[in-house]
Image (cartoon, rainbow, N blue to C red):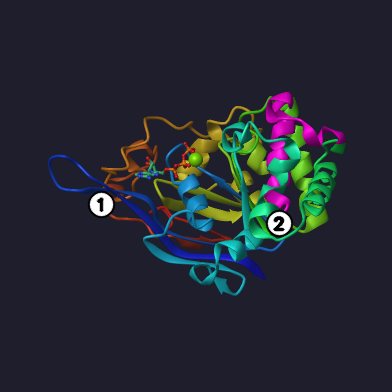
Amino acid sequence: MSILTVNNLKKHYPIKKTFGPEQTVKALDGISFEVKENQTLGIVGESGCGKSTLAKQLMKLETASEGTIDFGHSEISSLSSKELQSHIQMIFQDPYSSINPRKQAWKLIAEPLFINTNLSKEECFKRATEMMAKVGLRPELANRYPHMFSGGQRQRIGVARALILQPKILICDEPVSALDVSIQAQVLNLLMKLQDELKLTYLFISHDLSVVKHISDTILVMYLGKIVEYGPREQVFNNPQHPYTKALMASSPSLNTSGKQHTPITGELPSPLNPPSGCTFHKRCPVATEACSTSVPQLVKYQNRLVSCSELN
Ligand SMILES: Nc1ncnc2c1ncn2[C@@H]1O[C@H](COP(=O)(O)OP(=O)(O)OP(=O)(O)O)[C@@H](O)[C@H]1O
Ligand SMILES: [Mg+2]
């Protein structure tokens, strides 16, 4: 059963100009997907394609312009912030910038308990240190401050803090991008272990396709606020269909693409304020035809996935 269902989600940011008409950035432009319990959805796409905007709508940090988000049977607008936090939490690329440097580790981890429950300080301390052990931090380090930890350990604090209210879904927004490669693997292994143990569902956002490939069951590829390809990991990686997915894979040096050669991505991401007509990828697409500059491709079924390319429309 789906633990998260997103339907036709849009987030359009109005951009006010001193002169001229108001413009909009369509950061999300009609996104639909679902995630099954205990699975991982990997979300990929270049900088600015709307990944963090999606996370913000799911965490209810912003109000979507259109569309619906359902957690199981609860629509997001019907959930209080406390209820929402029991469904979904988030970890960030750089836990250091999102945590208070003057708080001891256990207090950082326990903070959501202080805010959302009436548990005693002793009970909060106990739960925080238990969670430290779960994420591979020695509970003896409970009284240390963030700067006394390494980057990998700080990300473990971020994970512990995100899990302390026992959410079912965890959004990981570039969780290992700021870490050394050797430490990345440790944090990824921890996330996979915790997923098994706690039956967690992950939305895993990353630039690094090799990381996404490692951890995901399903892959969602975004381009300028839209889904261009969405389906099972093996299919998307072994036989990508959208020219953008192919180009992304060819641009990822760390990815071992089983002998298939695609052209790496070229050109700049167009301005989101003034995206190209038709298929917004057509100016960078190696196989674009005349028609691609005028007709907007729809997501259509291809095998077990959805692809938005005029070649398949
Ligand atoms: N509050 C805002 N007001 C106006 N535009 C915004 C706002 N937040 C995001 N955007 C724009 O929306 C688009 C999507 O941004 P978003 O941060 O979701 O991208 P991203 O995929 O997370 O990128 P990155 O990989 O760099 O983190 C960008 O063009 C961004 O400039
Ligand atoms: Mg982002």
Q: Which residue is mark 1?
A: 294
**Residue 297 x, y percent position in the rendering:** 36, 56
Q: Sort mark 1 into few (<14), some (14-19) or many (20+) by Cα contacts within 10 Å.
A: some
Q: Residue at x 33, y 37 (%)?
A: 270
**Residue 184 x, y percent position in the rendering:** 71, 32
Q: Residue at x 67, y 48 (%)?
A: 111
- Looking at the picture, which amino acid does disc 2 mark? Leu
The quadrant of the picture occupied by the N terminus is bottom right
Checking the image for residue 165, the label placed there is: 2
Q: Nearer the viewer, residue 104 or 135?
A: 104
The answer to the question of whether label 2 and label 1 lie on touching residues, with beta carbons closer than 8 A, is no
Q: Is residue 177 above or below residue 89?
A: above
The quadrant of the picture occupied by the C terminus is bottom left
Q: Which residues are magenta?
A: 140-165
Checking the image for residue 214, the label placed there is: none
Whether residue 176 appears in this view of the structure is yes
Q: Residue at x 64, y 29 (%)?
A: 254
Q: Sort mark 2 into few (<14), some (14-19) or many (20+) by Cα contacts within 10 Å.
A: many
Secondary element type, mark 2: loop
**Residue 5 x, y percent position in the rendering:** 55, 66
Q: Earlier in the sequence, mark 2 or mark 1?
A: 2
Q: Nearer the viewer, residue 129 or 11?
A: 129
> How many labels sit on residues?
2
- Looking at the picture, which amino acid does disc 1 mark? Thr
**Residue 144 within the segment the image draws in magenta:** yes
Q: Residue at x 66, y 52 (%)?
A: 112
**Residue 68 within the segment the image draws in magenta:** no
Whether residue 217 appears in this view of the structure is no
Main secondary structure found in the magenta portion = helix
Secondary element type, mark 1: loop
- State left or right for residue 173 relative to residue 49: right
**Residue 76 x, y percent position in the rendering:** 52, 67
